[in-house]
Amino acid sequence: MAQTGLIHVRSAVHTVSYARLSEDKYHNVCNELGIRTDYPISQELDGIEALSGFDIYTMALICGVDECSMIFASRGAMRKHYDIMHKGVPIPTIWHIVSAQRLDNGSHKTYF
């Protein structure tokens, strides 16, 4: 993602001139190259091939309440989701299992 790349090249590790590139010029280059500036929404990723470099979870759980399609890698995380988002809805004893990937293998906990 473009913003992640900008943070990286501006880090103290890079002392070459392109690391001091202005943010506007950087984003113009990213636009020309077709590099995204935002994370994709789950609907864009649904049904596509696995993305290289992202962990694959073959036993992820998908929420089935109404139109909710949140995905979690553990039962504990899904229970927490129910407690917050679906208070009062009985928690299933059987979950729908899907293959999923986590968006960035880092701090974002968005699965698709």
Image (cartoon, rainbow, N blue to C red):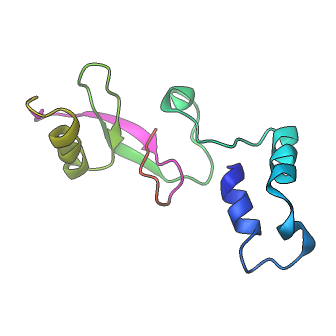
Residue 101 is inside the magenta segment: yes
Q: Is 13 situated above or below 79?
A: below
Q: Residue at x 89, y 76 (%)?
A: 16
Q: Quadrant of residue 81?
A: top left
Q: Quadrant of residue 10?
A: bottom right
Percent x, y of residue 2 = 72, 50
Q: Is 56 situated above or below 88?
A: below
The single residue placed furthest to the top in the displayed view is 66
Q: Residue at x 41, y 48 (%)?
A: 57
Q: Residue at x 46, y 59 (%)?
A: 107
- 111 vs 60, left or right, is right
- 20 vs 92, left or right, is right
Percent x, y of residue 4 = 66, 57
Percent x, y of residue 32 = 88, 39
- The magenta stretch is 91-105
Percent x, y of residue 37 = 69, 43
- 69 vs 8, left or right, is left
